[in-house]
């Protein structure tokens, strides 16, 4: 059985105190606790401080283009639907550049797990505002404050068709592990939005800020009820941050509905090489 060292790549270069450290440990621990090893899981990274984890996590991985990690993850899943596939992305990557892909991944119920480092800024490019920042957030790119209202990652994904939507806080590694594990174990599209302080470029959403506003869902919370989940997710708009599985339901995944995959995965199928036959059919 693999251990955390097996999943460890190069030493991380994140700033001291960055929430990404907690997320990095949580992802590795989750994979170990699920009994996976570096060759039995595929990881796709976006571009950003979050995406730099491509070098720090030892697994079959693609460091994809900015905003394009989800289509890559979906492609891998369709090629080998037996393999767990995770996409590790930033909030800019996932809700900004890749927002279109996110919506369609949700409605397709593609069986991948998206792990979002939600820090409200474009960290790697030194702190421009990102889509989850509160209205009025001042940054290099918005010196007078951002005019738009924030994306609500929970409400957006629940209403777009995601079948597992969870939230955790990078300062609570044990809870983050439990959310990532539950997301990977879920059959269908899963997303774990992780509230992640960027200690260098985001002086608003600090550890202190989150500690005053996060709370864990109680055991009486009904995560299977769609309307309850939508209402719960809207608390984000009032800067209250529920932690836990906000919504979970089951419906056939994308690959469940592809009869071509009933007998075997695409990669196990015999390769078609008789191209002459096709050409001749047109002559
Ligand atoms: C197509 C494209 N546009 C812009 C960039 C420049 N760029 C690199 S990282 C980044 C922002 C990353 O922000 P986020 O996804 O929130 O990740 P974080 O660094 O905060 O973890 C941008 C805009 C790029 N590499 N490619
Ligand atoms: S810039 Fe922000 S997100 Fe990037 S490593 Fe530093 S603290 Fe973390
Ligand atoms: Mg970011």
Image (cartoon, rainbow, N blue to C red):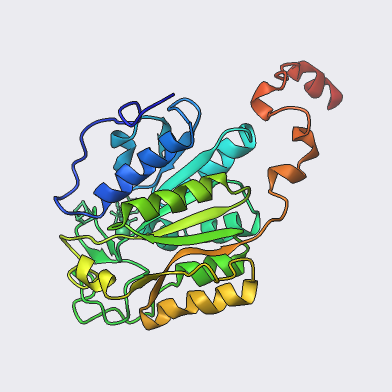
Q: Quadrant of the C terminus?
A: top right
Horizontal and vertical percent position of residue 95: 43, 62
Is residue 135 left or right of 44 when viewed as pictured?
left
Q: Residue at x 83, y 20 (%)?
A: 280
Asked if residue 49 shows in the view, the reply is no
Q: How many marks?
A: 0
Is 186 or 175 nearer to us in this picture? 175
Is 176 or 160 nearer to us in this picture? 176
Classify 15 as above or below 195. Answer: above
Classify 232 as above or below 117. Answer: below
Image quarter for ligand 1 equals bottom left
Is 32 or 277 nearer to us in this picture? 32
Horizontal and vertical percent position of residue 259: 80, 38
Horizontal and vertical percent position of residue 200: 15, 60
Q: Residue at x 50, y 28 (%)?
A: 40
Q: Splitting the image into 4 quarters, where does residue 255 fall?
A: top right
Q: Splitting the image into 4 quarters, where does residue 207 fall?
A: bottom left
Classify 161 as above or below 176. Answer: below
Horizontal and vertical percent position of residue 87: 46, 45
Q: Residue at x 63, y 47 (%)?
A: 187
């Amino acid at each position: 059985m693999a251990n955390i060292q097996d999943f460890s790549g190069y030493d991380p270069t994140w700033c001291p105190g960055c929430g990404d450290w907690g997320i990095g440990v949580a992802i590795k621990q989750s994979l170990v606790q699920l009994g996976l090893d570096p060759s039995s899981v595929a990881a796709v990274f976006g571009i950003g401080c979050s995406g730099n984890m491509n070098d720090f996590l030892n697994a079959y991985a693609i460091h994809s283009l900015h905003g394009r990690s989800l289509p890559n993850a979906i492609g891998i899943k369709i090629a080998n639907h037996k393999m767990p596939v995770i996409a590790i992305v930033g909030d800019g990557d996932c809700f900004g550049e890749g927002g279109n892909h996110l919506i369609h991944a949700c409605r397709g119920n593609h069986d991948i797990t998206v792990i979002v480092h939600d820090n409200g800024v474009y960290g790697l490019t030194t702190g421009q505002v990102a889509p989850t920042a509160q209205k009025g957030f001042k940054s290099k790119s918005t010196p007078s404050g951002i005019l738009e209202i924030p994306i609500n990652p929970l409400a957006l994904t629940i209403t777009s068709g995601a079948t597992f939507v969870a939230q955790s806080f990078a300062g609570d590694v044990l809870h983050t592990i439990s959310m990532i594990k539950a997301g990977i174990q879920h059959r269908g599209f899963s997303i774990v939005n992780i509230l992640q302080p960027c200690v260098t470029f985001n002086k608003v959403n600090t550890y202190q800020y989150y500690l005053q506003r996060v709370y864990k869902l109680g055991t009486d919370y009904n995560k299977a009820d769609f309307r309850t989940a939508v209402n719960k997710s809207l608390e984000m708009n009032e800067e209250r941050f529920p932690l836990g599985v906000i919504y979970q339901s089951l419906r056939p995944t994308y690959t469940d509905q592809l009869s071509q995959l009933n007998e075997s995965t695409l990669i196990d199928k015999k390769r078609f090489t008789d191209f002459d036959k096709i050409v001749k059919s047109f002559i």
